[in-house]
Amino acid sequence: MNDILPLTEEQREIRRVAREFARAEIAPYAAQWDEEAHFEPSIVRKLGELGFLGMLIPEEYGGLGLDTTTYLLALEEIAAVDASTAVLMSVHNSLPTQMILDFGNEEQKERYLRPMARGELLGAFALSEPDAGSDAAALRTQAVKDGDCWVLNGTKAWVTSGTEAGVILAMARTDTPHERHGGRGISAFIVTPDMPGFHVGKKEDKLGLRSSPTVQLVFDNLRVPAANLLGTVNAGFTYAMRSLTGGRLGIAAQALGIARAALEHARRYANERQQFGKRIRSYQAIQFKLADMATRVTAARTLLYATAAAKDRGEHVTQYASMSKLLASETAMFVTDEAVQVFGGYGYVKDYPVERLLRDAKVTEIYEGTSEIQRVVIARELYT
Ligand SMILES: Cc1cc2nc3c(=O)[nH]c(=O)nc-3n(C[C@H](O)[C@H](O)[C@H](O)COP(=O)(O)OP(=O)(O)OC[C@H]3O[C@@H](n4cnc5c(N)ncnc54)[C@H](O)[C@@H]3O)c2cc1C
């Protein structure tokens, strides 16, 4: 298909670099990593060397200082080959680095952003808890000031890259158990795994994204220096929600990459597979599937990159970010399901990549706000 997007030379070049990297360094191993639920640490180093872990960080802090569109183009390419690597890249760039950049003080930026941009410190984001998912403001991890430290107690759930992360942006309550203030009683802390009281808990055994480690983090009298409070006390939930607008664009790019890959595999297979003496692409039932898949991928791509451009112009994109994530993730589910159908029985086994794409697609409808929560946000914004 022709490229419908008006891209600059630089954007095309970075997309080409990302595509070649993904094909050479990730594609040959993605199925095996998925099978073995293996996280490959060298990928973080390689992404760091390319600058892909500091794409949105300004050059003065060691990043590439690129715009959102360019970042998402690279992310889409990585996701088209391996959604697990893409989520690592999306979370790192969109959430912890962005939170430090937007809300951190100069000392925190100097200390963390350079090694994060180089891939020496991988970032994670710890908002969810076992009993606080969609209703994240109900989180219970408690932070209490003790001298020049904050002492945190609680369990964070579903932390992407939690086993590998060198910097975790963790949200905890700074109101009191006697006087709760919902989201306005939560602060953000820069946590590192060497702090006393930090423990990695249960590792999740997942349907998809199997080579991305998702874990609980247990804070048992975790002592966080007061200097590692991000911004001001009780503002952490607002910081997390603002960063999630950008995060949702990252997940939309991930979903788009998965959908695009499934379409391409189905397109090629339909051209090769013969039944009843003809290539199956000659049957209208298959043609219509491919047409619907291509149309939805193009719609999701167009909305995503229009939103990215609006974000870079400084416009308010909360609603469009939710729409982009909703459309891209539901497109990924539709397209991967249809791709398995085009492959028939071969789509249901691990000899071809489409069953992995289907398993990986599902989570894009769940994390960084489920599809139901995206609809809540979209509907709410219709009245603001
Ligand atoms: C692989 C993976 C990686 C993740 N990575 C991270 C991470 O790095 N950091 C992090 O903080 N979290 C992470 N998460 C957590 C993720 O964001 C939550 O799973 C998600 O927000 C949903 O929360 P929940 O699982 O508790 O589901 P629940 O909130 O319990 O939802 C259950 C169902 O109820 C629906 N529902 C809930 N409330 C409403 C409502 N008001 N209106 C309509 N429907 C509603 C939901 O849409 C869903 O269908 C990850 C999750 C997964 C699976």
Image (cartoon, grey):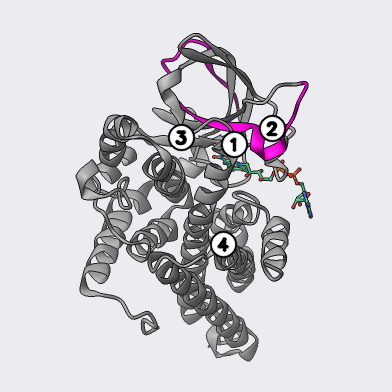
Residue 213 coordinates in the image, percent (x, y): 51, 35
Alpha-carbon distance for marks 3 and 4?
A: 22 Å
Q: Nearer the viewer, residue 357 or 380?
A: 380
Looking at the image, do the residues carrying marks 2 and 1 touch, with CB atoms under 8 Å apart? yes
User: Where are the magenta residues, as a range?
Assistant: 178-202
Hey, what amino acid is under mark 1? Leu
Query: Regarding mark 4 in the picture, which secondary structure is present there?
Result: helix
Hey, what amino acid is under mark 4? Thr
Alpha-carbon distance for marks 2 and 1?
A: 8 Å
Q: Earlier in the sequence, mark 2 or mark 1?
A: 1
The residue that mark 4 highlights is 318
Alpha-carbon distance for marks 3 and 1?
A: 16 Å
332 left or right, relative to 75? right
Query: Regarding mark 3 in the picture, which secondary structure is present there?
Result: loop
Which quarter of the picture shows residue 375?
bottom right
Q: Quadrant of ligand 1?
A: top right
Q: Nearer the viewer, residue 245 or 284?
A: 245
The residue that mark 3 highlights is 231
Disc 1 crowd, CA 10 A, few/some/many (<14, 14-19, 20+) = many
Query: Regarding mark 1 in the picture, which secondary structure is present there?
Result: loop
